[in-house]
Image (cartoon, rainbow, N blue to C red):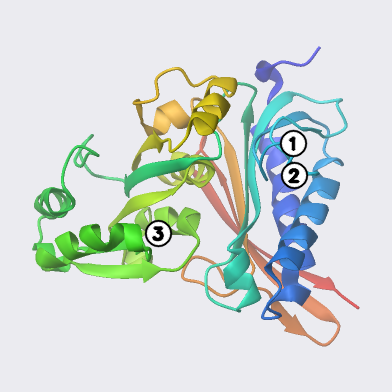
Amino acid sequence: MTNKLEFQDRMLSLGLARVAEQAALASAPMIGRGDEQAADQAAVNAMREQLNLLDISGVIVIGEGERDKAPMLYIGESVGTGEGPGVDIALDPLEGTTLTAKDMPNALTVIAMGPRGSILHAPDVYMRKLAVGPNYPTNVVSLDMTSSERIEALASAKGCRTSDITACILERPRHSEMIADVRATGAAIRLITDGDVAGVMHCADADLTGIDIYMGVGGAPEGVLAAAALKCMGGQIFGQLLFHSDEERKRAEQAGIKDFNRIYTLDDMIAEDVIFAATGVTNGSLLSGIQREPGWATTETLLMRSKTGSVRRIAYRTPVD
């Protein structure tokens, strides 16, 4: 029998890194080619193939979508050999398909794994998100605050001026009021076109990235993946699901969501220790993209375990045709 007590994060972590690496390498030929779908499909195929080599009894809880819309790595799909521990898997085979197709920064392959029942089964709907890095008081900011109140509270906790704070926000029309509100405080904003998993991760290493806070509305699956990263890196994240139709509410009910107004914390989204891996596809502020030279390709992967707080940066050089 398999159960969550058998989850050996240390033994599985390097296997998870390989899953992320191979997905990145598979998408590499599509960088800058303008074909988002082909780039994503290449990453999906490689990630699924590698997952099925691992000795796990895995279930995709955050994946490519519902079964009728995604033929592979769909929510509820079983992966692995079936011979190992029962695990939940959250993944985005190519976080930043547009970034890859246009050869823009911060495209990643992302995957997280935890014991069965440890990762929130978030439906594919929108989520209000708010995240900050480690070393702040609990609930220093909240979703109930206005955007300007968050900046002011964070500056006070950090012991700096509001003009010293930088926020990361997805560049979308729905955020125009938020952007104006933040800029009115004197804070800076780094607008990103895609890739809000990376956007949240930036908060956890503000000294490196220059990002203090992430806020805005984006996909709920990406919110859970970002929470898995913060579980390892440290920080706080808050999320609230947003529903725009009865069909979305029905999908949420099928995923086990009962309170449609609930505000989820980090520990609500990631209830137990997890492992997390991300490989750079294009160059970014967190990871180097795939470096190509005649006959070779080199990847950089961030591999983390929340149980120990360990962070590895793995350079992997492999021959290619």
Three-letter amino acid code of the residue under disc 1: Arg
Q: CA distance from mark 3 to mark 2?
A: 29 Å
Three-letter amino acid code of the residue under disc 3: His
Disc marking residue 202: 3
Report the residue at 59% width, 69% height from top. 98
Three-letter amino acid code of the residue under disc 2: Ala
Image location of residue 24, percent across then percent down: 71, 63
**Which residue was labeled with disc 1?**
67
Disc marking residue 223: none
Does residue 119 show up?
Answer: no
| Label 1 crowd (10 A; few <14 / some 14-19 / many >=20) | some
Mark 2 vs 1: CB contact within 8 A:
yes
Q: Is residue 169 left or right of residue 30?
A: left
**Image position of 222 with respect to 109: above or below:** above
**Image position of 99 with respect to 277: above or below:** below
Does residue 111 show up?
Answer: yes
Disc marking residue 70: 2
Tell me the quarter of the picture where residue 278 sits: bottom right
